[in-house]
């Protein structure tokens, strides 16, 4: 259970890193440096938690779940912060990512 929670935490940290990356692209000077440090820290925590989760979970499953959380989260960041639209095609492909990750976890 703790390893699954670590994997989910790794995915959340990855998405948080994408949020900071998105904000860094729009910032200047000292704020840009602070956001860069936050990006390094969040991605570092994400990779550490992923490595911890791989102590018990199979690499193929752990990496797929982590990547899926990151992909869906990145789309969410784009929709929330950049006003991107979610059309039918994008919705179908997001569903397929989520469905695939769930099925990999179940088998």
Image (spheres, grey):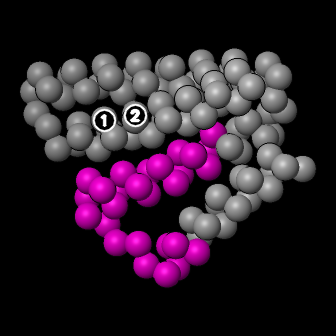
Asked if 43 appears above or below 74 in the picture, the reply is above
- Residue 21 placed where, x, y %? 32, 38
Position of 58 with respect to 66 (left or right) is right
Element on which disc 2 rests:
helix
Asked if 39 appears above or below 73 in the picture, the reply is above
Instruction: Determine the residue positioned at 81% across, 29% down.
Output: 57
Instruction: Determine the residue positioned at 22% across, 21% down.
Output: 34
Q: In the displayed orientation, state which residue is furthest to the front.
A: 1
- Residue 43 placed where, x, y %? 47, 27
Position of 36 with respect to 14 (left or right) is left
Category of crowding for the residue at label 1, using alpha-carbon neighbours closer than 10 angstroms: few (below 14), some (14–19), many (at least 20): many
Q: In the displayed orientation, state which residue is furthest to the right.
A: 107
Q: Which dot marks residue 20?
A: 1
Q: Tell me which secondary structure the magenta stretch mostly adopts.
A: helix
Q: Quadrant of residue 2?
A: top right
Q: Which residues are magenta?
A: 66-92
The residue wearing badge 2 is 17
Q: Determine the CA span between mark 1 and mark 2.
A: 5 Å
- Residue 70 placed where, x, y %? 53, 45
Position of 5 with respect to 1 (left or right) is left
Q: In the displayed orientation, state which residue is furthest to the bottom.
A: 88
Query: Is 81 included in the stretch rendered in magenta?
Result: yes
Q: Please tell me which residue lies in front, 73 or 44.
A: 73
Position of 101 with respect to 73 (left or right) is right
Instruction: Determine the residue positioned at 29% across, 25% down.
Output: 36
**Label pair 1/2, CB-CB below 8 angstroms:** yes
Instruction: Determine the residue positioned at 52% across, 79% down.
Output: 89
């Amino acid at each position: 259970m703790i390893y699954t929670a670590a994997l989910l935490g790794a995915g959340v940290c990855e998405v948080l890193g994408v949020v900071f990356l998105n904000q860094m692209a729009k910032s200047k000077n000292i704020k840009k440096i602070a956001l860069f440090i936050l990006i390094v820290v969040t991605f570092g925590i994400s990779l550490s938690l992923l490595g911890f989760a791989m102590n018990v979970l199979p690499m193929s499953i752990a990496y797929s779940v982590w990547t899926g959380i990151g992909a869906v989260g990145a789309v969410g960041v784009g929709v929330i912060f950049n006003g991107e639209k979610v059309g039918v095609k994008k919705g179908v492909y997001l569903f397929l990512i989520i469905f695939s990750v769930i099925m990999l976890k179940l088998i």
